[in-house]
């Protein structure tokens, strides 16, 4: 994996403001879609979380993305490019035929910016627990790329989605100062991206953990999955060896599937927390190293805990 200087991720260099509204409930969010004529014609039945029965007149056409709420959830409002857990089904509005269905019962995790533009617009300001019906014109859908799936440039795409969860975009806990010396210093950009400065001293011999932001959400467990943003740095080289921030999407993993030092540091921490961890080689990748991590490397991680999937 490509290495990058740790300071390239300093707060001033990659300060990217979140798009969308600030958290504060539905009244604080301005939807980018409307409850229009086309979306109101999409009939949906069945239980939330189960594959829906969908009925619509064909051909169904929309000139702009429209969203109707079939079941109004009472969970948090999705704002900005938050990671969203949902199940959905897509249909061709011209024929009514299915295009794609994401698994129901085991909903997937998606970043709105990586979906069709109309899907992302429909999720904006929706509430967790909602089932929505969406009519997406070609310009906000597959466009010319839909031919492989049998979708013409004139076809409207219909989406029915059950939104089961949404995760923080960055740690939002209360700031806590580091009271122990010898830790790297961390600065955080507006979008949450951390930058680290590693001390010139020798690394500590033992595992070191500091909570930089103290969240008050659910606790990370030994066996459950967690949704995180992270940056990993090599102490001696002062270079980044891995970063979900660089990849542009949070990561989902479980404590029993990561290196021991990181698992020890994160189990019991709460959603909304940002955790700084210094990991000695024996609790990291040891004498053998791994990929961009050399043998006997001391590792530094900054981890934002965005949610749990226990």
Image (spheres, grey):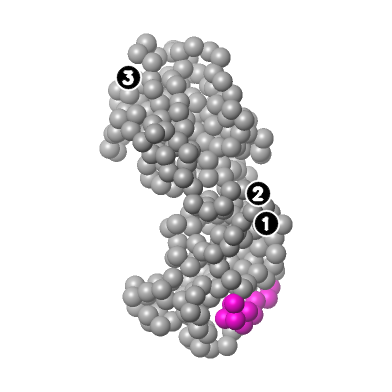
Q: Position of residue 18 (x, y in %)?
A: 49, 47
Task: Residue at 59% x, 77% y: name it.
Answer: 36
Q: Which residue is mark 1?
A: 27
The disc label shown at residue 236, or none: 3
Vertical placement of residue 204 versus 59, above or below? above
Task: Residue at 49% x, 33% y: name it.
Answer: 303
SS category of the residue bearing label 2:
loop
Q: Position of residue 287 (x, y in %)?
A: 34, 22
Q: Is residue 264 highlighted in magenta?
A: no
67 left or right, relative to 63: right
Determine the residue located farthest toward the left in the rendered image.
Answer: 2
Structural crowding at the residue carrying mark 3, measured as other residues with C-alpha within 10 Å and reported as few (<14), some (14–19) or many (≥20): some
Q: Earlier in the sequence, mark 2 or mark 3?
A: 2
CB within 8 Å, label 2 to label 1:
yes
Kindly report the distance in space between the C-alpha atoms of the residues bearing marks 2 and 3.
Answer: 43 Å
Q: Earlier in the sequence, mark 3 or mark 1?
A: 1
Q: Position of residue 60 (x, y in %)?
A: 52, 85
Kindly report the distance in space between the C-alpha atoms of the residues bearing marks 2 and 1.
Answer: 7 Å
65 left or right, relative to 163: left
Q: Which residue is mark 2?
A: 24
Q: Nearer the viewer, mark 3 or mark 1?
A: 1
CB within 8 Å, label 3 to label 1:
no
Task: Residue at 29% x, 33% y: name it.
Answer: 4
The disc label shown at residue 97, or none: none
């Amino acid at each position: 994996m490509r290495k990058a200087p740790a300071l390239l991720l300093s707060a001033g260099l990659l300060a990217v403001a979140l798009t969308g509204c600030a958290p504060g409930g539905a009244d604080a969010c301005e939807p980018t879609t409307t409850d229009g004529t086309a979306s109101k014609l999409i009939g949906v039945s069945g239980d939330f979380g189960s594959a829906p029965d969908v009925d619509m007149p064909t051909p169904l056409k929309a000139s702009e993305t429209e969203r109707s709420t079939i079941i109004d959830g009472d969970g948090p409002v999705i704002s900005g490019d938050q990671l969203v857990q949902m199940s959905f089904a897509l249909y061709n509005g011209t024929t009514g035929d299915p295009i794609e269905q994401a698994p129901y019962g085991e909903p997937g995790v998606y970043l709105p910016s990586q979906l069709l533009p109309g899907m992302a617009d429909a999720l904006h300001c929706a509430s967790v627990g909602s089932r929505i019906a969406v009519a997406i014109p070609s310009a906000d859908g597959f466009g010319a790329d839909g031919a492989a799936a049998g979708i013409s440039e004139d076809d409207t795409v219909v989406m029915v989605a059950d939104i089961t969860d949404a995760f923080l975009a960055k740690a939002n806990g209360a700031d806590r100062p580091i009271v122990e010396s010898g830790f790297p210093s961390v600065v955080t950009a507006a979008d949450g991206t951390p930058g680290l400065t590693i001390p010139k001293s020798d690394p500590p011999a033992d595992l070191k953990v500091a909570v930089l932001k103290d969240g008050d959400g659910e606790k990370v467990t030994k066996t459950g999955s967690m949704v995180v943003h992270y940056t990993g740095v090599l102490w001696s080289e002062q270079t980044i060896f891995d970063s979900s921030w660089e990849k542009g999407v949070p990561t989902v993993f479980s404590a029993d599937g990561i290196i021991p030092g990181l698992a020890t540091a994160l189990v019991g921490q709460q959603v909304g927390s940002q955790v700084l961890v210094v990991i000695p080689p024996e609790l990291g990748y040891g004498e053998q190293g791994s990929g961009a991590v050399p043998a006997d490397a001391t590792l530094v991680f900054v981890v934002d805990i965005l949610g749990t999937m226990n």
